[in-house]
Amino acid sequence: MTEADLDQVARLEADLFGAGGWSRAVLEEEFHAPARHYLVDVIPANDGANDDVDEGADDGANDTVRGYAGYWYDGDDAELMTVGVGTAWQNQGIAGRLLDQLLADATADGARRMLLEVRTDNEPALAVYRRRGFERIGLRRRYYQPENKDAYVMAVQLGERIVGFAPAAQGQPAQDTAAQDRTAQNQPAQTPAQTQTMQERKD
């Protein structure tokens, strides 16, 4: 994703979520926030027939953005921030492809786990997540406002999980890694706006 994509992403947000969508200003703040990783799925301006998941190598000002997704990662768990697909391009596998790329990128970044929130009544999104190994680990009541809807907290393991004491390097004390394994229930909010994920961004 590049800054040139933000106007189109803001229009998709408005179409998908109305007043609850992220504004252009919020999207720009999120785009420039540290430790963020965002992708867009585009129809390139010079080739309307080909799909392209773009990480921002080109300006892309004239590309058509069909979908977007991103996560936050600062060296602990990766947190899925958003996955959105325009209504004209839903049910084509775009959200799943974006999610697969994010999982691969988070793994390459060194994340051992990815977390997300999803509305408890959004069966299409739940099915997408479950197919990729996400499991429910918690419940956040009345998480989505103003709808007053509950959210499941879900997680998928990306790398080896060490529980207890990790083997120490020669001459170094062992580390208690279990104490470092945060759960979703005690994570602070990470965005300037209500976190939104694929629970409302159906593919």
Image (cartoon, rainbow, N blue to C red):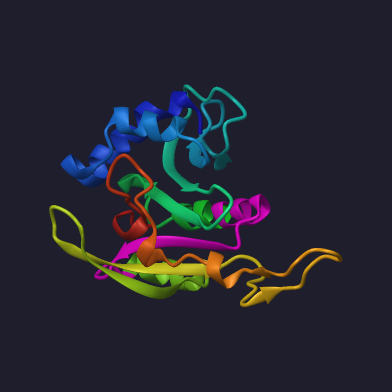
178 with respect to 130 (left or right): right
**Residue 153 found in image quarter:** bottom left
Q: How many marks?
A: 0
Residue 162: in magenta span: no
Q: Is residue 56 above or below residue 193?
A: above
Depth order, front residue of 199/113: 113
Q: Position of residue 186 (x, y in %)?
A: 37, 63
Q: Position of residue 92 (x, y in %)?
A: 44, 55
Q: Residue at x 53, y 40 (%)?
A: 35
17 with respect to 105 (left or right): left
Depth order, front residue of 195/95: 195
Q: Is residue 50 visible?
A: no
Stretch in magenta: 102-123
**Residue 168 found in image quarter:** bottom right
Q: Residue at x 53, y 38 (%)?
A: 49
Q: Residue furthest bottom?
A: 164
Q: Residue at x 47, y 23 (%)?
A: 62
Q: Position of residue 29 (x, y in %)?
A: 38, 30
Residue 103: in magenta span: yes
58 with respect to 130 (left or right): right
Q: Position of residue 161 (x, y in %)?
A: 63, 72
Q: Is residue 125 visible?
A: yes
Depth order, front residue of 75/30: 75
